[in-house]
Amino acid sequence: MSGINDSLSFSSSGYSQLRTREGVRYHYYNDLGPRAGNCTWGVGTLAHFGICTEEELKQSVSSTDVNNALAKHVQKLERYLRRKVNKHPLTQAQFDGLISFSYNVSDPSPVMELANRGDMDGVRKSMLKYVYVFNHDKNGKKVGPPRLLPALYSRRLEESSAFK
């Protein structure tokens, strides 16, 4: 069975923008600063919840591993998006925006439901609410209060711009 958005794939422009938004690092790092956030590498690839160990922080990652992890994650998100938004056609810019957004959040399903209903203004408004970050323990449980991250607001403005 063919879906309404099956012909769409993440564009080369989308990849370029995602790499710029996430940054590319060829080593392990803590995504919210030296002793905060989650252990991450490459283009925002989660190694595990909680901060990196001292040993992990010394680890380098090859460009091949970075690119392969990015491609694998994007392909998974493309399948997810096509499955979740199967009643309303998306433009290429909307598809790219939703992939970038989904790459960065743990649960994009509320936004996907709005897109599937064709509520594009609702998509834009909902995306703009995802501007807070949480610290997690090693089991993935949120610890401490949410923190507003101004850079996320700028990112969400870009990702949601096709939904005006």
Image: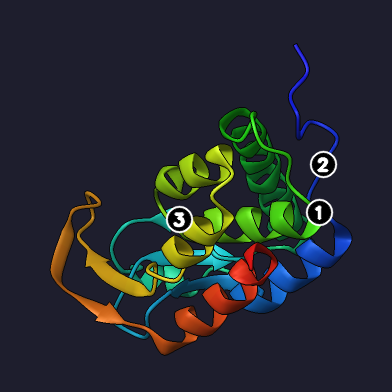
Amino acid at the residue labelled 1: Gln
Q: Residue furthest left?
A: 144
Q: Please indicate, yes or no, whether residue 45 appears anywhere in the rendered image.
A: no
Q: Residue at x 62, y 60 (%)?
A: 100
Residue 35 - label: none
Amino acid at the residue labelled 3: Ala
Q: Nearer the viewer, mark 3 or mark 2?
A: 2
Check disc 3 and report the residue beneath it: 47
Specify whether 73 is left or right of 95.
left
Q: Are marks 1 and 2 in contact (CB under 8 Å)?
A: yes
Residue 8 - label: 2
Whichever of labels 1 and 3 marks the residue nearer the N terminus, that label is 3
Residue 155: x and y in percent read 56, 77
Label 3: few (<14), some or many (≥20) within 10 Å? some
**In the figure, 69 relative to 60: above or below?**
above
Q: Please indicate, yes or no, whether residue 39 appears anywhere in the rendered image.
A: yes
Check disc 1 and report the residue beneath it: 92
Q: Residue at x 22, y 49 (%)?
A: 139
Label 1: few (<14), some or many (≥20) within 10 Å? some
Separation of disc 3 and disc 2 at Cα?
A: 29 Å
Amino acid at the residue labelled 2: Leu
Which residue is more in the foreground, 61 or 3? 3
Q: Secondary structure at mark 2?
A: loop
